[in-house]
Image (spheres, grey):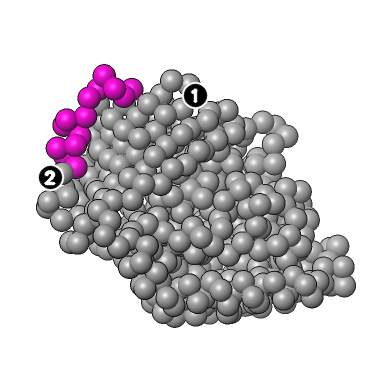
Amino acid sequence: MAKVKNKLGLIFFPAFDWAISETHPEREERLLYTQDQIFEEGIEDIEGIEFYNPTIATEKDIARVHFAVPDVASRLTPSHLIAAGGAIRAYQAVMEKEVDKSFALVRPPGHHAHRIVYGDRGFCIVNIEAVALERIRQDYGDLKVAIIDTDAHHGDGTQDIYWNDKDTLFISFHQDGRTLYPGTGSIEEFGGPSAYGYNINIPLPPETGEEGFLYVLENVVMPILDDFKPDIIVNSAGQDNHYSDPLTNMNFTAQGYAILNERLNPDIAVLEGGYSIEGALPYINVGIILAMAGLDYSHVWEPDYDAERLKQDPSITAHIKKLSNVIYSLWKHKDELAKEAFKNKTKITREQNIYFDTAQVMEHQIQTYTICKDCAGVDFIDSENDKNAHIFAITIPRKACQKCIDKAYKMYDQSNKESFTKIYLQDRVNDKYLSK
């Protein structure tokens, strides 16, 4: 009998009753083939690997992270609350020391869900990693957390949520946004005034293979984690960098994903994208499970794996080495860069156009971040969409000073309901969420 190095918790939720359509790539079979592979490998019989049922996230859990328009109850389905609850259960199992590590194999995914939610975009409506993390911070106290997003698509929603949070390091390595949805994730997207440098994007060229991903891990991600020293490492475990994925143009492998997880050594992994339902996901997920448990994964290979065909072009290797040097240099000089970027400023604005592709809603928003010498400062969003919604959303950050708390409540009280269809206040200090 195999013996685990790390006791591992697994949370499964295939969401049988939710799909965008019967033939959509984000459907329940994404996890059912993995489930079959796990049983075939006998993983459920390994001592030290435990299976847990998800909990159900509450409306307050969602409101802690998102401004759901018009409200949480009408915007989310039960499946979304259970998927977020699965991620919460993964955190709880680690925090309560029931297990050493956990992996939430849940759907629908979440990393494209921004703070404001008008509907599904990129198959996501609620950011399950962020909802789970903020519930855990509420229950267990403040934590310094690194989220490493290995999905082929840039984690633009997670970036948006943690743009100005210095306690949450977000690193996304993904297929270059100039070649793939959602079109974001350049190295210039570096974070807000209170967290400049703590949002790190590593845009990789199409056809990046195992060599490139593991080079970035060893030469950018791991050195930054050594500097940051997080309490928890989370892998936002998208699997669509695989060479057989129908939506992307990358050449990563199941072995590569397993090696990455062994070296990254995350405390928690949460499934994101990955749409090669039969050819990739069962092998990648089994590889990740074995790697997280500290078991041998050397036998996990795709039936059509061909090392020669997947060999990385030398020009891609050279590009990635140069890119890695630039990004790590930016990280090392982030404090000087921040002083220069925000010198003599009391606030900064950030403008975004966001398309909710499933709901077919176009949003235009202006985010304003106030700069406070005592805390991260109040921020607020003025958001309009082409379906006649116009909202105003105010956030008090977790460690806000009293002056900023008072400013935010005054702003909320004085906001004119006649000017907006909805006004929100997110008080992260007192865990209180208002709307009118």
Which of the 4 quarters of the picture holds residue 18?
top right
Is 174 contained in the magenta span?
no
Which mark, residue 386?
Answer: 1
> x, y (%) of residue 37?
71, 58
Q: Is mark 2 on a helix, strand or loop?
A: helix
The residue shown at (58%, 65%) is: 202
> x, y (%) of residue 49?
53, 67
Query: What amino acid is found at the position of numbered circle 2 in the picture?
Result: Asp
Q: How far apart are marks 1 and 2 (CA)?
A: 33 Å
The residue shown at (29%, 46%) is: 379
Using the image, determine if residue 235 lies above or below residue 231. Answer: above
On the question of residue 269 being in view, the answer is no
Which mark, residue 141?
Answer: none
Residue receiving disc 2: 406
Q: Along the line of sight, which residue is nearer the eye, 202 or 45?
A: 202
Quadrant placement of the C terminus: top left
User: Which range of residues does the magenta coloring cover?
Assistant: 408-421
Q: Along the line of sight, which residue is nearer the eye, 325 or 141?
A: 325
Left or right, 378 with reference to 156? left
Quadrant placement of the N terminus: bottom right
Query: What amino acid is found at the position of numbered circle 1 in the picture?
Result: Asp
Q: Is mark 1 on a helix, strand or loop?
A: loop
Is 410 contained in the magenta span?
yes
Left or right, 107 with reference to 230? right
> x, y (%) of residue 422?
31, 26
Q: Along the line of sight, which residue is nearer the eye, 125 or 294?
A: 125
The residue shown at (37%, 26%) is: 390
